[in-house]
Amino acid sequence: MNINARQIEALDFNYLNQAETYQYNADQLARVKSSAAIMAKLQAEVAAWEASMQTFDVTYRKATTAGQTKVVENRDAERDKIYSGFVGTVNNALKSPIEAQQQAATTLQEPIKRYAISTGAEYQEQTMRTEQICQELLANYAPQLTALGLTAWVEALQAKNRDFKAAMTQRTNEQAGFVKSELANLRLQIISCYRAFVKLMNVVLIYEGDTAYASVIDQLNAEVRHYKQIIARKGGPVSASSYTGGSDTDSDTSDGGSSNTGSGTSGTGTGTGGTGSGSNESGSDSGNNGSSDDNGGGVGPGDDIIL
């Protein structure tokens, strides 16, 4: 047993947003998987961690490329086709040998030019302009539409535009649901799996020594320190010694929901399970059996864990 062995340092995820949390875990997972020694010892924990990352990735892709997106694109294309046909018919009627049709087409040019709808415009702008021109045409230009047989075209355009708006609303709601609930919950799962791995890895380091793992642990800690600099710029703990631990404010209770405090000293952490070695951090934790911080950064040899 080597209580002075390297330990994976703590990281307070409270100060990292969703994207930063994902990127940190993706990079650290890649480093861990590159170590044959770690994979031989903690394959199950790494697999669970990786699975949580994959689930997050699949859900994120679903949120950004939801099936409803295809419906939106189809509705937009259908709307564009009707509008282009309407404008084309009006333009052709300008050359009609029938005077009433020429006059009707000339009159209809005014709202067409005033609203200047572009089928390549932003969705919101095109939807608003299309609804407005349809309402005005049906209310104020009924005789001209009748003369050119375009009343049904405008009604169809209005209906398709509203179908498009409904599809957009549904897609937005779907994506908002994923982002606010699914992805938020999956972020907590990633953190939980990461902490489970760190806690057991630190136990391995204490009981087996760090010789076989030194290189990758140093790489992991270098990344931890890099993210601590990011956290510091956000007003979080400046260094490992000032880290105060604590569970994430987003209700992540993956470590048993205990309340942790760091003493700010380098050396050991105490807990009900015994005295544990912390990496430049220490603290008391009655809920984690000697863990020195909230991500399992140091585990006491009194912990009842079988490797």
Image: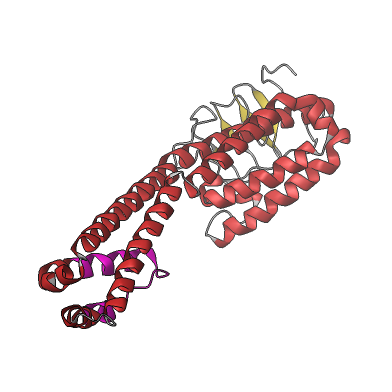
Q: Position of residue 298 (x, y in %)?
A: 68, 34
x 41%, y 52%: residue:
74
Q: Is residue 14 above or below residue 290?
A: below
Residue depicted at x 61% and y 32% = 193
Q: Is residue 118 magenta?
A: yes
Taking the spot 43% from the left edge, 42% from the top edge, the residue there is 178
Residue 54 percent across, percent down from the top left? 61, 37
* Dominant secondary structure of the residues highlighted in magenta in the image: helix
**Residue located 71% across and 44% down the image:** 28
Q: How many marks do you count on the picture?
A: 0
Q: Would you say residue 265 is visible in this rendering?
A: no
| Residue 288 is inside the magenta segment | no
Q: Is residue 300 left or right of residue 132?
A: right
Name the colouring of the figure.
Answer: secondary structure
Q: Which residues are magenta?
A: 110-134
Q: Is residue 258 left or right of residue 22?
A: left
Q: Identify whether 282 is placed above or below 304.
A: below
Q: Nearer the viewer, residue 39 or 294?
A: 39
Report whether residue 36 is seen: yes
The image quarter in which residue 86 lies: bottom left
Q: Is residue 92 left or right of residue 152?
A: right
Residue 225 lies left or right of residue 69; in this view the side is: right
Residue 93 in the image, given as x and y percentages of width and height: 27, 77
Rendered view: 206 above or below 139: above
